[in-house]
Image: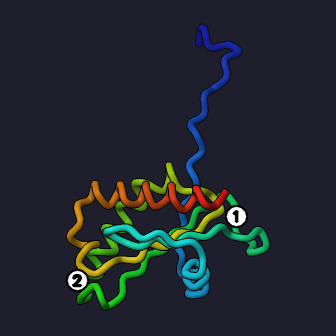
Amino acid sequence: MQGQEGSAAVMPPAVPVLSILRKRADFLRASRARRQGTAGFLLQARRRDASEGIDPSTLRIGYTCSKKLGNAVIRNRAKRRLRAIARDVLPDHGRPGWDYVLVGRPDATVARDYTAMRADLLRALEKIHAGAG
């Protein structure tokens, strides 16, 4: 090709790898760490230790919706909504090496407007990371 000799290829910015929290111990560690409440959910977050043996470029996310939210249909709807906002926001605004848990709130997680929940997550992440130094 003409005109591209010596020009370096532009690589897109690296997107952190998202993985799902599955072990109870990981959820318990997050529950003892930083937390930020919003109208639609509670965000729990913690920076992982290097000694845990998990890739530091990985960003992990978990979801919790208890029976306080309602029956199985309501809980699953709430988790789908939490997964959607996490997929939308965390790749750009989450930090690699951190674990995040989104906890659903009764009535609010299912009924709150999606754009408001997205704004809640952005604001909660800013507050969590502002105190992290």
Q: Is residue 76 above or below residue 121?
A: below
From this view, report whether residue 30 is shown above or below residue 118.
below
- Rendering coords of residue 112 (x, y %): 23, 66
x%, y% of residue 108?
A: 26, 73
For disc 1, the neighbor class at 10 Å (few under 14, some 14 to 19, many from 20) is few
x 42%, y 73%: residue: 42
Gap between marks 1 and 2 measured at Cα? 35 Å
Q: Left or right? Give the position of 66 relative to 20.
A: left
Q: Amino acid at mark 2?
A: Val
* Residue matched to label 2: 73
Quarter where residue 129 is shown: bottom right
Inspect the image, locate mark 1, and give the three-letter code of the amino acid beneath it. Answer: Asp
Provide the residue designation for mark 1: 55
Question: For this view, does 67 lie left or right of residue 121?
Answer: left
Q: Residue at x 58, y 56 (%)?
A: 130
Residue at 35%, 54% in the rendered image: 119
Number of numbered discs overlaid on the protein picture: 2
User: In this view, which residue lies farthest toward the right?
Assistant: 51
Lower position in the chain sequence, tag 1 or tag 2 = 1
